[in-house]
Image (cartoon, rainbow, N blue to C red):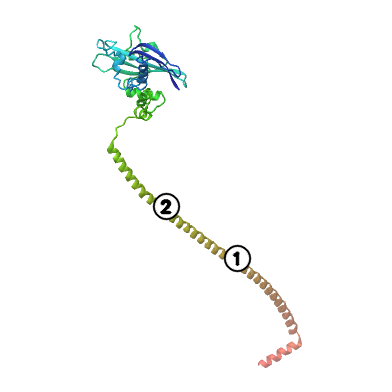
C-alpha cells in the first residue's frame, strides 16, 4: 500500500508555505471558509494530474480556478488578488510505499505570469521524501517551472496532463483510467439526501443520451433475436443430421463387424477342411506304406518260390523221366 504522509503547499490560496502531516486516517476539520476544501483540492489536483473541479466539495457553483488558487483570489472591490504580479505555486505530496519501504514524492508547479496567459503547469516525480530544495533555491526564492527543471532534481518531469496521468497510473499500481474522472466526484463530501442522485452525479461518468443510437441498438437487438431464432432452428436440424450420421456410422460399424465375422468363419471352415484333407492324406500314406510292406512280402515269397522252382526244374532235368518226356514232346511236335 502507498500511504500519503505529507502535503506541502506554497502559494496555494491562503496557504503561503505550509506542510501538513498525514498519519493513517486523518480528519480535517474546521469552520466554513477555513481551507478544508482548499487542501482537498490541492491533493486531488496533483493525484488526478489537473482534472480536479475546484471546491465542488463545498459549493456546487464554485468559480474557483487555478489562477485564483495560486494568486489567492479575494474578489473584493479594492483588491482582486492577495498576491500581486507574477506568482508561482507549489503542491507536493509525499507517499510511503510499504512494499518497497521507501518514500516517493509527486507534485506540481504552477506559473501564473501576467493577466492574459494561461497558467503554465508541470508535474513531476521524485524518488525520496519531501525536500526544501524542491521548492526554494539557494537565494530563498520560490522555484519557477523553468528553474525547477534546471535543478534536475526530479526523476521525471511531465509537461502535459496526459503524460502525468499515464505515469501516476503506473506509479499507483496501474489504476483504471476512470479513476481521474471519478475521484473528484467522490471527494464531494456533502450530506447525501438522495443516494441515487449521488451515484449518477458523482460516481458515474457523464454521457450524453443518444436516442438514435438507442433506436439502432433496439433494431439491431431485434435483428439479433430473429437471427438467433434461425440459428437455433439450424442447430436443431444439425443435431438431427448428426444423430442420423451417428446412426448410419453405427450401422456401418455393425456391418463391418458382421463382414469380419463371416470372413473369420469362412477362414475357420477352410482351416477345418484343410485339417480333414491332411488327416486323409496321412491315412492314405499309412495305407500305402502297409500295402508296400505286403507287396514286398509277396515279392519276397515269389522270389523264394522262383528259386525253389528253379531248383526243382534242375532236379527234374537230370532225371530220366524228364528226359523221356522231352523226347516224347519233341516227336509229337515234329
- From the image, tell me which residue sits under label 1: 275
CA gap between label 1 and label 2 equals: 53 Å
Q: How many marks?
A: 2
Instruction: Give the label on residue 239, or none.
Output: 2
Q: Dot 2, crowdedness within 10 Å: few (<14), some or many (≥20)?
A: few
Residue at image x 75%, y 88%? 321
Q: Relative to the observer, which residue lies in front, 162 or 25?
A: 25
SS class of the residue under badge 1?
helix
Residue 317 versus residue 205 in the image, above or below = below
**Snapshot quadrant of residue 5:** top left
- The answer to whether the residue labelled 1 contacts the one labelled 2, judged by CB atoms less than 8 Å apart, is no
Residue at image x 32%, y 18%? 122
Give the side of residue 37 with respect to residue 243, left or right. Answer: left
Q: Position of residue 323 (x, y in %)?
A: 73, 88
Q: Position of residue 304 (x, y in %)?
A: 72, 77
| Quadrant containing the N terminus in the rendered view | top left
Amino acid at each position: 500500500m502507498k500511504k500519503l504522509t505529507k502535503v506541502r503547499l506554497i502559494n496555494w490560496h491562503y496557504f503561503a508555505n505550509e506542510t501538513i502531516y498525514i498519519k493513517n486516517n486523518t480528519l480535517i476539520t474546521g469552520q466554513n471558509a477555513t481551507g478544508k476544501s482548499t487542501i482537498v483540492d490541492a491533493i486531488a489536483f496533483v493525484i488526478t494530474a489537473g482534472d480536479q473541479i475546484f471546491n465542488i466539495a463545498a459549493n456546487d457553483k464554485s468559480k474557483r480556478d487555478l489562477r485564483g488558487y495560486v494568486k489567492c483570489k479575494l474578489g473584493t472591490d479594492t483588491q482582486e488578488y492577495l498576491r500581486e504580479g507574477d506568482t508561482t505555486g507549489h503542491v507536493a505530496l509525499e507517499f510511503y510505499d510499504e512494499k518497497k519501504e521507501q518514500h516517493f514524492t509527486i507534485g506540481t508547479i504552477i506559473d501564473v505570469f501576467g493577466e492574459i496567459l494561461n497558467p503554465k503547469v508541470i508535474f513531476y516525480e521524485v524518488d525520496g521524501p519531501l525536500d526544501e530544495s524542491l521548492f526554494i533555491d539557494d537565494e530563498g526564492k520560490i522555484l519557477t517551472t523553468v528553474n525547477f527543471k534546471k535543478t534536475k532534481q526530479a526523476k521525471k518531469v511531465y509537461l502535459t496532463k496526459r503524460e502525468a496521468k499515464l505515469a501516476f497510473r503506473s506509479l499507483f499500481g496501474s489504476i483504471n483510467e476512470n479513476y481521474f474522472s471519478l475521484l473528484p466526484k467522490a471527494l464531494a463530501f456533502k450530506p447525501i439526501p438522495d443516494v441515487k442522485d449521488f451515484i449518477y452525479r458523482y460516481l458515474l461518468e457523464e454521457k450524453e443520451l443518444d436516442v438514435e443510437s438507442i433506436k439502432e441498438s433496439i433494431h439491431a437487438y431485434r435483428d439479433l433475436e430473429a437471427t438467433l431464432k434461425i440459428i437455433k432452428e439450424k442447430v436443431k436440424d444439425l443435431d438431427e443430421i448428426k444423430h442420423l450420421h451417428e446412426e448410419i456410422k453405427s450401422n456401418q460399424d455393425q456391418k463391418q463387424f458382421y463382414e469380419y465375422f463371416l470372413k473369420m468363419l469362412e477362414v475357420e471352415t477352410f482351416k477345418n477342411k484343410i485339417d480333414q484333407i491332411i488327416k486323409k492324406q496321412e491315412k492314405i500314406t499309412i495305407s500305402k506304406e502297409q500295402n508296400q510292406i505286403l507287396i514286398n512280402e509277396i515279392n519276397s515269397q515269389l522270389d523264394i518260390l522262383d528259386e525253389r522252382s528253379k531248383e526243382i526244374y534242375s532236379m527234374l532235368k537230370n532225371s530220366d523221366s524228364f528226359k523221356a518226356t522231352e523226347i516224347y514232346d519233341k516227336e509229337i511236335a515234329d
